[in-house]
Image: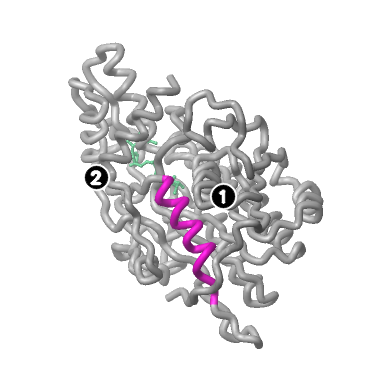
Amino acid sequence: MPDFRCITPVNKNSRIFIAGAGGMVGSAIIRNLLEKGFNNLVGSFHSSPPQADKFTLIPNSETLPKGLRLVQIDLTCQDEVKRFFKELKPDHVFLAAAKVGGIHANNTFPAQFIHENLAIQGNIIHAAYEAKVKRLLFLGSSCIYPKQAPQPMKEEHLLTGLLEPTNEPYAIAKIAGIKMCEAYNRQYGTRFLAVMPTNLYGPNDNFDLETSHVLPALIRKFNEAKQSGAPEVVVWGTGSPKREFLHVDDMADASVFVMNLAEPVIDEHLTNYPKPCFVNVGTGTDCTIKEVAETIKEVVGYKGSLRFDTSKPDGTPRKLLDISHLHSLGFTAQLDLKKGIEDTYDWYCKRL
Ligand code: GFB
């Protein structure tokens, strides 16, 4: 079991760097921190600056919230990251920048998934150590666990079996990130923690049909089918795999909670270094892809039928997280799946 203890919460004025501010998770963490009164936030983006409405959720809002600055950095470039950390000297870091995507993207671009993720996290974790960052939170993924792991999957199931082939390169990169945090904690006495979220969804998700995850893909497919009057919607795979879906606002809340409250216990001789240094984040319940498709169909108000395309991969049969450790620390996810889908559909429609 991860070994954490409560400490003084992060100071509201401390300089907090959120890597990946333009993404669904990074922007949700920023919204959460701003709501809680943190006022010295710096978020990074790579290619184009994120719209202000990512951080306010008010469509077309143009002004960035007070207390937030955005900077452009190529996080895969070691020199840029080193220079940035030297100048900014952040107190705390949320490492939410990553190359992410659904089953098809992972299967099609395995080199990019392993290369970009290893580069981003390697550069940031090392630069954070050199810049004496007080605490860093690395965001992983539930795909780190073996394909045949016992359900629900506990933190100690890491590295006990073979991975799911469709996302092995991504999973290997995330496992390397965890092990890097643990190695730095052990050798240098750093306070680097990690959270392993289950499948996330919510505002600012990727709705591209080729690269997205199942939930945003189906919101878009059902909505387009409703508008065009198409008689059926194609759902990939058999519909029988099970997934656990967590709203990104709950994920952001859990990330800030872990950053705020928990710290690995490290004794002065570094012999009691924390291993593992991560905690699962989920809802504790899952459903089949067929069930989630039917819920989305109902929310969207589509009247046609579903067709399962079994030429597409199912991926992992099931990946339900054991969240007892997170519960014992005092955190429980709040948002119900149906309500979360309704809110996400509403957000999606406002931006069409
Ligand atoms: O969400 P998803 O792409 O990723 O797919 P994973 C989940 C399940 O939904 C698979 C099915 O069984 C898909 O075949 N599915 C049905 C669809 N219709 C669709 C559709 O239209 N689009 C998509 N994308 N799927 C990813 C990993 O795995 O999960 C990542 O590849 C990461 O590494 C992420 O861990 C959380 O849950 O299978």
Q: Bounds of the magenta span?
A: 248-264
Kindly check if marks 2 and 1 are in contact, taking CB atoms under 8 A apart as contact: no
Name the residue carrying label 2: 288
Along the horizontal axis of the image, is 128 left or right of 10?
right
For the C terminus, give its image quadrant: top left
Q: What amino acid does circle 1 point to?
A: Ala
- The residue nearer to you, when weighing 218 against 162, is 218
Q: What amino acid does circle 2 point to?
A: Thr
For the N terminus, give its image quadrant: bottom left
Name the residue carrying label 1: 96
* Magenta stretch, overall SS: helix
Along the horizontal axis of the image, is 5 left or right of 148?
right
Label 1 within 8 A of ligand 1 by Cβ: no
Query: Measuring 40% from the left and 29% from the top, which residue is drawn there?
Result: 347
Query: Measuring 71% from the left and 61% from the top, which residue is drawn there?
Result: 126
Query: Measuring 27% from the left and 48% from the top, which residue is drawn there?
Result: 242
Label 2 Cα crowd, 10 Å radius (few <14 / some 14-19 / many 20+)? some
Q: Secondary structure at mark 1?
A: loop
User: Foreground mark, 2 or 1?
Assistant: 1
